[in-house]
Image (cartoon, rainbow, N blue to C red):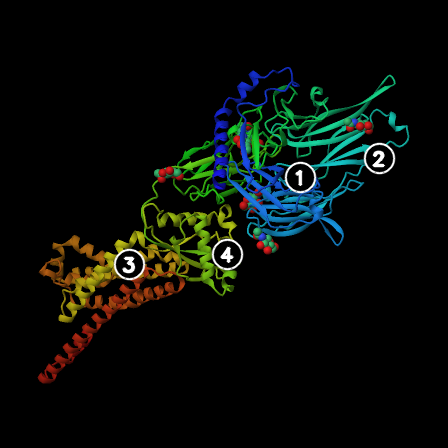
């Protein structure tokens, strides 16, 4: 039953919003045309078609509306309380808050906490919303008989996080207007006008703790013969605070009063911002020679055209022929946060001669006048342009009991007297005098690329914002979020860049801001994103005044359902921790926990299913930065075509790391410890090379088996030289692959590897050329053979650069082909044999050593280097075996010859010498 009611409310709310959007198109034209411009005092029609009605139904019996709070994003907070039946100024000591979002989603906060009597009778309680779903309830409590203000920090789950002491009972506490920038407590000023302030941080996103960021005093400019009268504080749009002082001339004796040049009243303004946590030197923004009774600040609001507009009332006594009367006039004081004065103009009398009214400036220009009456709850309101001309108006009837306003989007809110557990809520959108940037709720913006609700190509590399006036980049951020599919979960930060980060640029027209997009930002197909532009992302070039930004979920964009890219198998990569992270990691007892936590964070940030990222838990010190640690992670292959490929995930994570400062990686406990100066490098990437590697391995194994079979059968067979050559070739191929693809993982091995790869081959080539040339010159049979096949031979020469042993192929008699029956002399055969034997020490063993060093310096060891080791080992073994066979044959041969000699006793000393030299 209860759920049904909730859904009904949401339905009503949503349909009313839809109706609003349909009707809002023609608000402007119809309103201006249909209003009776001349008579601001006759209430116009009571309801208008663009009004939105909706009903909130309270689930808890007897809870009554106490107060409301409006957010700039359109969320309404309703504070419900149990009235004290005996004493109407009191409430029961509980706290119940309802958050109604623009989508109709409602969060119920019912705190299980009993407040002290001094907080609730009479009610001495308030609340301010803090960032990240925290709220602070401010209430009065006695501690050892001393009353003070305390802040109870709770979250949207109705959990109490902490309680802090805020200050004395008269402390003024306000949020900074930008919830991430915390809140401020300002003490009541003393008689000299000094007011102490304490600026507190926003709650920590995980612990909810707040800390004091700065403190100091607002102090009045020290002017001779002026005394402090009053002060007024207001929020700045960049999250800072403004503080205005009113000073009055001391009339000491009567002589001074006749001086017409004396400035009787002076108004100073000082600004407090987070960059310094220290107020600026007060600037004089207005002064007057008129002897007024008093000056009072009513309200101060930001305005796109003027900077800040404060409404001040001037109480003056006019003496006319013995008759005197006092009159109060309203003025608009306009100034910039640079401290410069813009304008001081009178608000038209026709408005201000009524008694009970409120005047405030509107973001879209012009003013709102709200008129109240003494014996009814009804109110009228008017929109005036900057010159005070009536533009439009409306009213709320006597059945309304509570009013508020969505100031940023210019919507008035009225709540009817509660009937049972139902609250009827009316939203009245106000006429906007300037319709520029209506889609963005920001009159400063002309257009954006992509436009609102545009479906974009995820590969775009920038977005742009065009402002109506020339702008300069400032310090605040522009951020892109991905909307969570689950509306109850927070949006996902994709990237955030501050205006002054050098990444953003202003076009040559001075109106257009270009913001780069990282390749990891729009990485999900068919998803919704929105861009948030903070206030003070840009400032006006002319006035140096921060401009408004774009609030969340306004500039929505979505990605089209794109193909996720080709399938790729698992990728293993290494990333580095920074020094802080490395030392934390090394101190841990359970390093696997670190791995698990960081994988969880990755899966949220990328975003990707947690199963896709795993680790073998391997780590090592970075050889080039011994204080830093390298960790190994594997991106597993996709299980279905719907999932992003491992290569895509790898690339996204790589971009996130490279841009860590601007992505959510820097907001999480573990991922913030990654060193962004080292890229995420692949240590094994089977995907691309796997088929190649398999073919390689299989053919090598076949080759080896054949080779050993052949050798086994006939140690002297020459025609197996072709196998040797093949073995050498593939050894060279894996060496080369290693040099091209892997050795860069270990920078200290690049040069040795190069030397032992290049030098032996050059020597080999020279030897081969030498052999062939001398054969051609001295061996007539070779010369004849050679002249028949010159091209093939040159190719063989090149091959023999790989290893001199390759020449042996030419003499192998393979298949009885002529090409393989080169008549090499014994001398050349010896050179080949010795050359290739020496090559073991010049190339093969050094290569093996390099491989062992490489193995020690990397975390994940893959196929390519292991192939190098296997084939290097085989080549050495083969050469050794070959050499031993050769020696054996020679030895047998000589033994036989010596036997023959002994038997024959006819051998000369010369022939023995020649025999020896042949070995
Ligand atoms: C202003 O905010 C209210 C409250 O969320 C919303 O219903 C209304 O549609 C908004 N108006 C405009 C013009 O965006
Ligand atoms: C409220 O808190 C008290 C203790 O502080 C606890 O005993 C009680 O169960 C809580 N009630 C609810 C409804 O959570
Ligand atoms: C204006 O000042 C006079 C003299 O101080 C005071 O009596 C009167 O109440 C003031 N009027 C208003 C509307 O504040
Ligand atoms: C911009 O964002 C960064 C990172 O989130 C944050 O540390 C910084 O305070 C923000 N700057 C402003 C001016 O909000
Ligand atoms: C843009 O601003 C710069 C400096 O602020 C100025 O020199 C230049 O003339 C401006 N360009 C245009 C097109 O207004
Ligand atoms: C895109 O998302 C919408 C809603 O989230 C869904 O209805 C639609 O089927 C999706 N389209 C594709 C091609 O996945």
Pointer 2 residue: 225
Image location of residue 710, percent across then percent down: 15, 67
Query: Depth check: 113 or 406 in front?
Result: 113
Task: Give the spatial CA distance, label 4 vs label 3.
Answer: 34 Å
Kind of element beneath mark 1: strand
Relative horizontal placement of residue 646, taking residue 84 as reference (left or right) = left
Task: Give the spatial CA distance, label 4 vs label 1.
Answer: 37 Å
Q: Nearer the viewer, mark 1 or mark 3?
A: 1
Pointer 4 residue: 578
Ligand 3 quadrant in view: top right
N-terminal-most mark, 4 or 2: 2
Q: Counting other residues with Cα less than 10 Å from the Cα at mark 3, is it few (<14), some (14-19), or many (20 or more)?
A: many
N-terminal-most mark, 2 or 3: 2
* Residue drawn at x 45%, y 60% as measured from the top left: 622
Image location of residue 489, percent across then percent down: 48, 45
Image location of residue 795, percent across then percent down: 20, 54
Task: Give the spatial CA distance, label 1 vs label 3.
Answer: 68 Å
N-terminal-most mark, 4 or 1: 1
Image location of residue 399, percent across then percent down: 62, 28
Kind of element beneath mark 3: helix
Task: Give the spatial CA distance, label 4 vs label 2.
Answer: 60 Å
Q: Nearer the viewer, mark 4 or mark 2?
A: 2
Rendered image: mark on residue 241: 1
Task: Give the spatial CA distance, label 2 vs label 1.
Answer: 28 Å
Relative horizontal placement of residue 339, taking residue 635 as reference (left or right) = right
589 in relation to 125, above or below:
below
Kind of element beneath mark 4: loop
Pointer 3 residue: 734
109 in relation to 549, above or below:
below
């Amino acid at each position: 039953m209860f759920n049904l009611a909730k859904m009904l409310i949401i339905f009503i709310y949503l349909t009313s919003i839809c109706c609003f959007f349909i009707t809002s198109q023609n608000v402007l034209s119809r309103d201006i045309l249909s209003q009776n411009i001349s008579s601001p005092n006759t209430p116009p029609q009571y309801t208008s078609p663009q009004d939105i009605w909706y009903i909130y139904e309270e689930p808890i019996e007897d809870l009554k509306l106490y107060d409301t709070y409006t957010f700039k994003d359109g969320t309404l907070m309703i504070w419900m309380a149990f009235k004290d039946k005996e004493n109407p100024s009191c409430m029961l000591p509980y706290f119940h808050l309802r958050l109604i979002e623009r989508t109709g989603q409602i969060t119920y906060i019912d705190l299980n906490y009993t407040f002290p009597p001094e907080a609730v009778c009479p009610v001495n309680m308030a609340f301010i919303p803090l960032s990240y779903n925290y709220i602070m309830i401010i209430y009065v409590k006695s501690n050892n008989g001393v009353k003070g203000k305390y802040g109870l920090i709770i979250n949207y789950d109705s959990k109490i996080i902490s309680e802090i002491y805020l200050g004395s009972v008269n402390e003024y506490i306000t949020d900074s207007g930008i919830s991430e920038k915390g809140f401020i407590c300002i003490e009541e000023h003393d008689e000299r006008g000094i007011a102490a302030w304490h600026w507190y941080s926003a709650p920590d996103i995980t612990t909810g703790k707040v800390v004091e960021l700065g403190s100091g005093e607002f102090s009045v400019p020290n002017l001779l013969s002026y005394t402090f009268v009053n002060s007024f504080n207001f929020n700045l749009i960049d999250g800072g605070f403004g503080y205005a002082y009113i000073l009055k001339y001391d009339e000491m004796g009567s002589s001074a009063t006749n001086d017409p040049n004396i400035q009787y009243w002076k108004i100073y303004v000082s600004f407090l911002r987070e960059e310094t946590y220290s107020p600026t030197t007060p600037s004089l923004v207005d002064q007057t020679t008129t002897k007024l009774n008093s000056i009072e600040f009513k309200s101060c609001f930001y305005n796109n055209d003027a900077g800040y507009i404060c409404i001040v009332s001037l109480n003056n006594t006019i003496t006319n022929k013995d008759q005197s009367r006092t009159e109060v006039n309203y003025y608009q004081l306009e100034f910039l946060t640079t401290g410069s004065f813009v304008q001081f103009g009178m608000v038209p009398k026709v408005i201000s001669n009524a008694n009970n009214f409120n005047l405030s400036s509107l973001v879209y220009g012009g003013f709102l006048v709200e008129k109240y009456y003494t014996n009814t709850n009804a109110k009228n309101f008017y929109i005036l342009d900057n010159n005070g001309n009536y533009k439009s108006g409306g009213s709320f009837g006597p059945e309304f009991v509570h009013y508020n306003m969505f100031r940023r989007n210019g919507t008035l809110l009225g709540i009817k007297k509660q009937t049972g557990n139902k609250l009827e809520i009316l939203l009245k959108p106000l006429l906007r005098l300037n319709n520029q940037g209506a889609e963005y709720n920001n009159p400063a913006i002309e257009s954006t690329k992509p436009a609102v609700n545009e479906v974009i190509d995820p590969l775009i590399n920038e977005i742009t914002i065009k402002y109506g006036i020339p702008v300069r980049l400032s310090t605040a951020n522009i951020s892109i979020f991905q909307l969570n599919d689950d509306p109850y979960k927070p949006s996902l930060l994709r990237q955030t860049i501050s205006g002054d980060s050098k990444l953003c640029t202003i076009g040559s027209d001075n109106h257009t801001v270009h913001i780069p997009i990282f390749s990891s930002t729009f990485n999900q197909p068919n998803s919704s994103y929105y861009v948030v532009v903070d206030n003070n992302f840009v400032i006006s070039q002319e006035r140096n005044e921060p401009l408004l930004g774009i609030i969340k979920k306004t500039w929505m964009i979505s990605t089209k359902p794109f193909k996720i890219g080709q399938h790729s198998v698992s990728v293993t990569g290494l990333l580095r921790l920074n020094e802080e992270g490395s030392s934390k990691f090394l101190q841990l007892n359970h390093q696997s926990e670190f791995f698990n936590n960081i994988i969880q964070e990755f899966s949220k940030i990328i975003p990707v299913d947690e199963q896709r990222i795993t680790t073998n838990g391997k780590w090592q010190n970075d050889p080039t930065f011994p204080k830093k640690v390298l960790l190994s992670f594997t991106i597993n292959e996709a299980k279905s075509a719907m999932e992003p490929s491992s290569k895509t995930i790898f690339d996204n994570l790589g971009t996130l790391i490279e841009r860590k400062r601007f992505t959510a990686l820097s907001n999480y406990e573990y991922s913030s410890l990654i060193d962004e100066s080292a890229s995420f490098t692949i240590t094994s990437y089977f995907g691309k090379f796997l088929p190649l590697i398999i073919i390689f391995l299989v053919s090598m194994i076949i080759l080896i088996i054949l080779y050993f079979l052949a050798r086994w059968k006939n140690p002297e067979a020459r025609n197996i030289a072709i196998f040797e050559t093949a073995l050498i070739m593939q050894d060279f191929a894996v060496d080369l692959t290693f040099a091209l693809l892997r050795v860069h993982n270990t920078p200290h091995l690049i040069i040795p590897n190069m030397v032992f790869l290049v030098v032996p081959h050059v020597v080999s080539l020279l030897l081969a050329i030498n052999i062939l040339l001398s054969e051609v010159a001295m061996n007539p049979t070779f010369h004849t053979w050679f002249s028949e096949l010159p091209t093939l031979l040159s190719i063989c020469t090149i091959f023999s650069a790989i290893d001199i042993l390759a020449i042996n192929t030419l003499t192998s008699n393979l298949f009885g082909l002529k090409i393989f029956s080169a008549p090499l002399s014994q001398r050349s055969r010896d050179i080949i044999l010795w050359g290739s034997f020496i090559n073991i020490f010049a190339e093969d063993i050094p290569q093996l050593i390099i491989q062992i060093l490489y193995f020690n310096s990397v975390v994940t060891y893959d196929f390519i280097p292991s192939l190098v080791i296997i084939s290097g080992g085989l080549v050495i073994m083969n050469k050794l075996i070959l050499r031993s066979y050769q020696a054996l044959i020679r030895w047998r041969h000589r033994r036989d010859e010596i036997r023959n000699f002994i038997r024959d006793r006819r051998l000369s000393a010369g022939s023995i010498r020649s025999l020896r030299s042949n070995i």
